[in-house]
Image (cartoon, grey):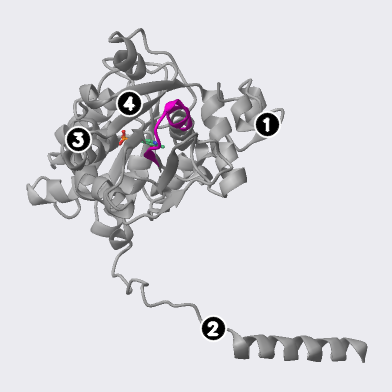
Amino acid sequence: SAAAAAAAAASAAMHKLLATAAPKSVLSLPPPVGSVLDLVGNTPILKVSDKFDTGCCELFLKLESQNPGGSIKDRIALSMVAAAEAEGRLRTGGRIFEATAGNTGLALALVAARRGYRLTVVVPDKMSDEKIASLRGMGAEVVLTRSDVVKGHPDYYQDLAARLAREAEAATGEPVLYIDQFNNPANPAAHFAGTGPEIWAQLGGRVDAFVAGVGSGGTLAGAGAFLKSVNPNVDLVLADPVGSVLAPLVESGSCGKAGSWLVEGIGEDFVPSVLDLSLVTRAYSITDAEAFAAARELLRSEGVLAGGSAGALLAAALKYCREQTVPKRVVTIVCDSGARYLSKQFNDFWMREQGLHPRPATGDVRDLIA
Ligand code: PMP
């Protein structure tokens, strides 16, 4: 029959193709590892294509979304737990508490599952359903708290996590560890030892500017300090949501009252203790509209599914690039995967509900990035 003849022809074509196909070289693939934790770090770097206007600069994205836990926080979860174990503050079966926008919690859940710890996370209620569902799926106990209060309020996520840890310890008599990424030196240390040196090596020792946001401040403090140590002239650039106090502090030396913003994971109402803001040479305040537009454009034009904080970093990096008059090599970070925000910035209904344009009128992201 005609169908049988067509199938025979397709089969013959495939065998001809297989006979001539050269297998790609796989010699550089890493060997099997014994734990998913061995897959943390060594993330790839992508050069942004000419679909984005980077002026006279080259722009690179370090894809921290490729960590097994889906974010840059895998690095600090490993280092903070390792430090606590080394200091004897954490033993098998022990309990960990943490205040988190979600990613540190997911990273800790990964480490806790592998190493046999119990984890309770306190998460502000503005964080995405995807993150909260993932946390619960990974076995963490999730305590949701208000997003509209600042440090010092008893319901503020960091104050609440510290209090719940103290209460749990008092109730059980068992030692409980409040990991406290905001004041934990093992947080920036992970970026000084890992993120920074990886960027430097991957870019062949030529990095002129590093653009980062601040949640705990660990990335900017740790990777920033490393890059400064190898290139004292490197520009450390802050990408900060409108409403956060940090960019105004850098740019004008004074901070107003903290506002609110939709982008998750970056922006603060105080300066985290791990961060030395005097190292920051330039800061940009980025609107939610700019951050989400940049993240959506990154998906459409480069195929990179990134969170809103990466959108804010990309928007700031593009502004920085376009302000330069001499060519520079600029690096920024895709902090986490956009899979965590499918119900938010990648959902046109949600975007409209927030009063944000789901699409730039002309398809050009510069329409939304002032
Ligand atoms: N982006 C996202 C999505 C985050 O969750 C965080 C951490 N809260 C950051 C960026 C900022 O990283 P860091 O804590 O190192 O300042």
Question: Where residue 1 appears, x then y in whole percent?
Answer: 92, 92
Q: What type is the residue that disc 3 sits on?
A: Pro
SS for dot 4? helix
Mark earlier in primary sequence (4, 1): 4
The residue carrying mark 3 is: 232
Q: Which mark is residue 28?
A: none
**Residue situated in front as seen by the camera: 353 or 43:** 43
User: Which circle, 1 or 3, is nearer the viewer?
Assistant: 3
SS for dot 2? loop
User: Which circle, 2 or 4, is nearer the viewer?
Assistant: 2
The residue carrying mark 1 is: 359
The residue carrying mark 2 is: 22
Q: What type is the residue that disc 2 sits on?
A: Ala
Vertical side of 70 occupied by 217: above or below: above
Contact flag, marks 3 and 2 (Cβ < 8 Å)? no
SS for dot 3? loop
Tell me which residue sits at (32%, 74%) in the image.
31
Mark earlier in primary sequence (1, 3): 3
Q: Dot 3 surroundings within 10 Å: few (below 14), some, or many (20 or more)?
A: few
Tell me which residue sits at (41%, 28%) in the image.
324
The residue carrying mark 4 is: 157
Region rendered in magenta: 318-332
Contact flag, marks 2 and 4 (Cβ < 8 Å)? no
> What whole-number distance in Å separates the C-alpha atoms at marks 3 and 4?
36 Å
Mark earlier in primary sequence (3, 2): 2
Toward the left, the furthest residue is: 87
